[in-house]
Image (spheres, helix red, strand yellow):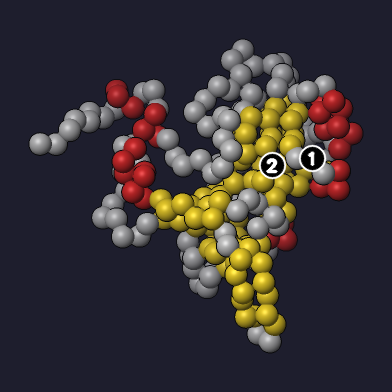
């Protein structure tokens, strides 16, 4: 069952929900609006292939960017600001400005704002669920479904975090490889514990 605004405030007071920085104006009837930060990664289309089960392949595949002051011409309007440019039919890896964490029996899930979904983008590609115990900024995989570039202003309310209560606290809260993130986290499939049982990797001569 999702938590209401009153539930969220109560759990924050109890230390079971962490939202930093917190802005009371972003609190919704059953969630909290999160904004997009300035750091983002684009995909390097010049690589021959992608094998994310080796760290070197991940390092070559993504390019780190920071949104800069930009001037756009839109029809007869001049628009200035910091923007994240989404390539046509492409995606970027970005993150929320806010650090969000949960403890005890609280689990969180991020959803795209409906107004943005109606303009042709989504923000999580099915990966918007966080385990109890995660704490950090939330990485979001933003996809542009349009055939033209899309410009997202930094600081825009990008999605809503919804909180749920589990029936009982988990035996082992999340202590995984993405907790503690302060900016977008690239995939770490190469750190999967069971990977060594699936593939064999050795240095080439």
In front of the other: 50 or 97: 97
Image spot of residue 149 (x, y percent): 53, 70
Tag 1 secondary structure: loop
**Residue at the image point whose x is 22% and y is 31% from the top:** 201
In primary-sequence order, the first of circles 1 and 2 is 1
Determine whether, in the image, residue 2 is placed left or right of residue 119: right
Image quadrant in which you'd find residue 29: top right
Looking at the image, is 202 positioned above or below residue 88? above
Looking at the image, is 47 positioned above or below residue 175? below
Farthest residue toward the right?
A: 6
Whole-angstrom CA distance, mark 1 to mark 2, is: 8 Å
In front of the other: 82 or 30: 82
Which residue is disc 2 drawn over?
98
Determine whether, in the image, residue 101 is placed left or right of residue 180: right
Determine whether, in the image, residue 59 is placed left or right of residue 99: left
**Residue at the image point whose x is 29% and y is 55% from the top:** 47
Looking at the image, is 111 positioned above or below residue 150? above
What is the crowding at mark 2: few (fewer than 14 residues within 10 Å), some, or many (at least 20)? Answer: many
Image spot of residue 130 (x, y percent): 62, 33
**Residue at the image point whose x is 67% and y is 72% from the top:** 80
- CB-based contact (under 8 Å), mark 1 and mark 2: yes
Residue 22 is labelled as 1
Determine whether, in the image, residue 154 is placed left or right of residue 148: right
């Amino acid at each position: 069952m999702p938590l209401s605004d009153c539930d969220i405030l109560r759990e924050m007071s109890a230390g079971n929900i962490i939202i930093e920085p917190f802005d009371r104006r972003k609190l919704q009837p059953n969630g909290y609006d999160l904004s997009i930060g300035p750091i983002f990664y684009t995909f390097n289309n010049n690589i021959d292939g992608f094998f994310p089960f080796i760290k070197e392949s991940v390092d070559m595949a993504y390019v780190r960017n920071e949104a800069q002051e930009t001037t756009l011409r839109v029809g007869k309007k001049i628009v200035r600001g910091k923007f994240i440019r989404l390539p046509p039919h492409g995606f970027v890896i970005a993150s929320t400005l806010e650090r969000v964490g949960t403890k005890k029996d609280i689990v969180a899930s991020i959803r795209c704002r409906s107004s943005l979904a109606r303009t042709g983008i989504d923000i999580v590609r099915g990966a918007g669920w966080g385990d109890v115990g995660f704490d950090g900024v939330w990485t979001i995989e933003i996809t542009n479904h349009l055939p033209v570039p899309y410009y997202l202003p930094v600081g825009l309310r990008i999605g809503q975090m919804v909180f749920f209560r589990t029936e009982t606290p988990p035996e082992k809260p999340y202590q995984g490889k993405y907790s503690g993130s302060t900016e977008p986290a690239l995939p770490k499939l190469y750190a999967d514990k069971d990977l060594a049982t699936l593939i064999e990797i050795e240095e080439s001569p």
